[in-house]
Image (tube, rainbow, N blue to C red):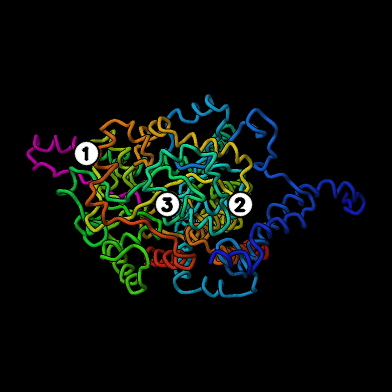
Amino acid sequence: MEQSWKAAKSLFAAVLGPPLFWLVAFFVIPLAIVWVYSFGQNQGLVGISFTGTFSNYARAIEPLYLNIFAKSAWIAAITTALCLVVGFPVALAITFAPTRTKAWLLLLVMLPFWTNLLIRTYALMAVLRTEGYINKSLEWLWNGVGGLAPLVGLARLGDFQPLELLHNNFAVVLGLVYVHLPFMVLPLYSALDRLDRSLLEASLDLGAGHLRTLFLVVVPMALPGIASGVLITFIPALGAYLTPDLLGGPDSQMIANVIERQFKRANDWPFGAAMSFVLMYFTFIAIAIQAVLSRKPRGAR
Amino acid sequence: MNTNGRLGGMSRRSLLTAVGAAAIGVSFTACGQEKPAAGPTGGEEPKLNFYNWDTYIGDTTLADFKKAAGIDVNMSLFATNDELFAKLKAGNPGFDVIVPANEFVTRMSQADLLQPLDHAKIPNKKNIDPAFLNPDYDPGRKFSMPYTWLVTGIGYRKSKVKGVPDSWKWLFDSDMYKGKIALVSDSADLIRIAAKYKGHSLNNIPPELVTEIEAMLIKQKPYVKAFHDDNGQDMLVARDVDLVMESNGDIAQVMRDDPDLAFVVPKEGSLLNSDTLCIPKGAPRPDNAHKFINYLLDAKVGAGISKTILYPTPNAAARALMPDSYKDNPVIFPAADAMAKCEYGAFEGAETASLYEQVVTRVRAA
C-alpha cells in the first residue's frame, strides 16, 4: 500500500524539515560562498571583490597544478587498488564467518573509527620512524643474527641500516590504505552478504574451480558493491590532507595541501576556492563513472 | 596600501554576515562573542581567551594570574601565524589576547584586525629593553608588546655531524647530510633564509634571486627528508634527521633532555623574529586583556615564563632575575658576531607572500 506524500504534507514537512535545514545551512550555503569566492579577486588583505573573473580557474588548470591533481589522483588510485585487493578477501571471509563471529569481525573493522584520525596517524609515525618500532625490531633481529653469525663461521654483518619508512610517498600510501580500508570493506561486505549462495554452489557443481567461481560469478555480482567501495575510498583519498602532511616527504604534497596553503600562507582565498571546486568537479566525474558502472549489471540481467 | 584594503569589495566578514543572515533569517550568537557581563573586574566577566603557541607559557603562569587577578584564562593553541591570521580575518571568534610574530603585527594592523593598546594600562612596559620599544614593524608599539624574540638557525645532533655546521650550505647546497635534513615549510622563511645564504638581505629579494633560489631548492630537494611545520625539534629528538632549520628556543627546550643536540646561527646570518602580545579587534574583554598583558610583562612573571620556554626575552627586568645558565646560554643568546648579520623580515605585501608560496609549490611538485 503506497501512500502519496501529498496525503500527509505536514508530516512530510516535519520529517524533511530538519535535515533539509541542516543541509542548506551547513552545506549548501557555505559551499555557495566558496563558489562565489572562486570568481573573485583579493582586495588588500581581508577583502575580496567579486569580479566574475575566471582567472582563478585559469590558474588552477595550469600545468603545475594539473600535475599535482594528476599526482593526487594517482596516489588515490593506488590507495584504492590496494584497499580493494586487501579488503575483498577480508569482506569475503566475514561473509562466510558464523553469525556470532561475524558481528565481532565487523566490530573489529570499525574499531579504528573510535580513535581520532590524528592520533592514528601519529601512532603510525611512531611505528615507521627511523627509531620506530619496525626499525627497532629489525635492528634487534639483525644484531641477534649478527651475534650468531661468527659462531657458525660466517663473516660478521655490518652495522644495521634503518629502513626509510617515514616521510616519503610509501608512507603516504600506507597511511591512506590504513585509514581507508574500513570504507572499502563495509560496502563490499554488504554486497557480498546479499549474494545468492545457491549460484556459487551451482557454479562449483557445474565444474568451475574456486578461483573461476570467484572471478566469473562473485565479482560480477558484487560489482555495484565494488564500485561504491572504490568510490568512497577514492574520493576521500583524493582530498587527503592530514596524511600527506604528516607522513609525507618533500615531494609528497597532494592537492589538498596546496589548497590549504592558499587559505593560510598565500592568503589567496579566491584561488584556493577555485582549486577546491576543480577538485569537486573531478569528484563528480568519479561519481558519474560509478553510476554508469553500477547500472550495467542490472541492465544485463 | 593598507588604506585600499577595504575599499574595493565587500569584506569577507560582511559577506559572511550578509549571506548568513539573509539566507537563514535567524541570528545566532557566535560562541565567543558573549556580551561582557558585570563582574568583579571592572564590568567584565572574569574570563579571558588567550590564543597562544604551544609550549609558550610558564608552568604556573595562568594559575598565578587567576590567583592575582581572579581572571580565568582559557588558552587555545595555534601552530602557525597563517593559522592565526586565517582565523581572525573572518571575524574575531572571541579571542582577547593573541601572540602574532612581528611580520604579522604589520600585516594584521594593515588589515585592521588589531586594537591599539592603551599604554597607560600597561605600566610594566617600563621593564622592556629600550631596544625593543620602537621596532620598524610596529612604530611606537601602538599595537603590540614584545613577548619573546627568536632567531632561526641550525639545530643538529653533535655525534652525527662533522664539527659545527655553521653555514646554511649544509642545508641548502650540499649532499653531505642527504636524507638527514629538515627545512621549514613556511615559504617566506625558507626563501628569505636562502637569500641570506646567497649573500643578500632577506628583505626586497630581487626576482632573479628568487628564481635562483628556486633552482637551488629543486636541486637540493632529493637530499631533504621533510619540510616541517615548526616541529623540527621533535624530528631531531626522534633521530629522523640530524640537521634541522629551527628557532633557538625550540632547540634550547629539547637540549635540556638530550645533551647530544646543539644549535648554531650560521655565519651568513639569519632571520630574527619577535612574538608579541596583541589585542585583536572585537576582543570581548579588552580590560582583562590589558591586565593580562601587563601581568605577563612583570619581571618575576616574565622570568617564570622564560624559565619554562627558554626563549630569549626582551624583558630586561625579567632577564636580570634569571640564572646565569639562561643569561649566558649561547643557544638562547647567540654570540654578538653571529647576531650582527641577522635581520627582521618585513611584511612585503600579499603579492610577495603569494609569489613565495608558488615557488615552494613548484619546488615540492618538481
Which residue lies at the image location 58% right of the left edge and 43% below the top edge?
B95
The nearer-to-camera label among 3 and 2 is: 3
**Residue linked to disc 2:** A199
Query: Which chain is mark 1 on?
Result: B
The nearer-to-camera label among 3 and 1 is: 3
Per the rendered image, the range of residues in magenta is A142-169
Q: Which of A88 and A299 is in front in this view?
A: A88
For the residue marked with disc 2, what is the amino acid? Leu
Query: Which chain is mark 2 on?
Result: A
Q: Position of residue A289 (x, y in %)?
A: 60, 66
Q: How far apart are marks 3 and 2 (CA)?
A: 84 Å
Helix, strand or loop for disc 2: helix
**Residue linked to disc 1:** B260
Name the quadrant containing residue B184.
Answer: bottom left
Helix, strand or loop for disc 3: loop
Q: Distance between the residues labelled 1 and 2?
A: 67 Å
